[in-house]
Image: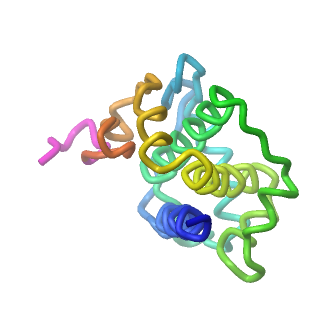
Amino acid sequence: MKLRGIKLAAVALTAACVLVSAGCTTRSQMAFTVNGAVTTTDEVQVMIDGCTAALGMATSPISASGLVGTMIGVDLARQVAADQKVTYTDDELRQPIQSGSVASLMLTDPNCAQLAFGMVLAGLLADQLGASIFQADAQAIPVIVNPRFGTWDTATLSISGSGSLSQADS
């Protein structure tokens, strides 16, 4: 059961990392909030820059919308862990990361490493608490997303929509 959660986290992490598109410029404004904690578009850009460098993707920037969804998932996992009083050390979060994996490359950048650790945390929490409890706890946490990145779907705990202010969502 523990491997299933870790595999799910690895799949989600890989999916977030391979989503690529042309980047948009960022301004110092809210990208999203999780339980009232604001993450700015500048912070998202720092994460994009760090993960792009760590993954060697200079010619194919990481999708801001995809990364925002991953960052929200990580923040939700951290909030659920705090609410449930569950703690893991960085060493415990590093153990499931296989050498040569995308996640291991992410560890080469300090910001991107925190994203990798957060994805592992989500998988470990889903195993420890049970996926349905983890999901219910995460769904209860308020999330607000800047429409430029899409729309937060509480049911699926993911970003949906185009993320374009000039293009209607289908």
The prevailing secondary structure element of the residues shown in magenta is: loop
Q: Position of residue 156 (x, y in %)?
A: 32, 46
**Quadrant containing the N terminus in the rendered view:** bottom right
- Chain part drawn in magenta: 162-170
> How has the structure been colored for display?
rainbow
Residue sitting nearer the eye, 56 or 111: 111
Residue 5: image quadrant is bottom right
**Residue furthest to the bottom:** 100
Residue 108: image quadrant is bottom right
Does 52 sit left or right of 32 as displayed?
right
Up-down relation of residue 34 to residue 73 (above or below): above
Residue sitting nearer the eye, 27 or 55: 55
Residue at 82 percent across and 57 percent down: it is 92
Residue at 29 percent across and 40 percent down: it is 155
Instruction: Specify whether residue 17 is in view.
Output: no
Residue at 59 percent across and 44 percent down: it is 74
**Residue furthest to the top:** 36
Residue sitting nearer the eye, 134 or 169: 134
Exactly how many numbered labels are in the figure?
A: 0
Q: Position of residue 79 (x, y in %)?
A: 61, 31
Q: Position of residue 81 (x, y in %)?
A: 66, 36
Up-down relation of residue 77 to residue 104 (above or below): above
Q: Position of residue 161 (x, y in %)?
A: 25, 45
Residue at 59 percent across and 37 percent down: it is 75
Does 15 sit left or right of 168 as displayed?
right
Question: Residue 163 lies in magenta, yes or no?
Answer: yes
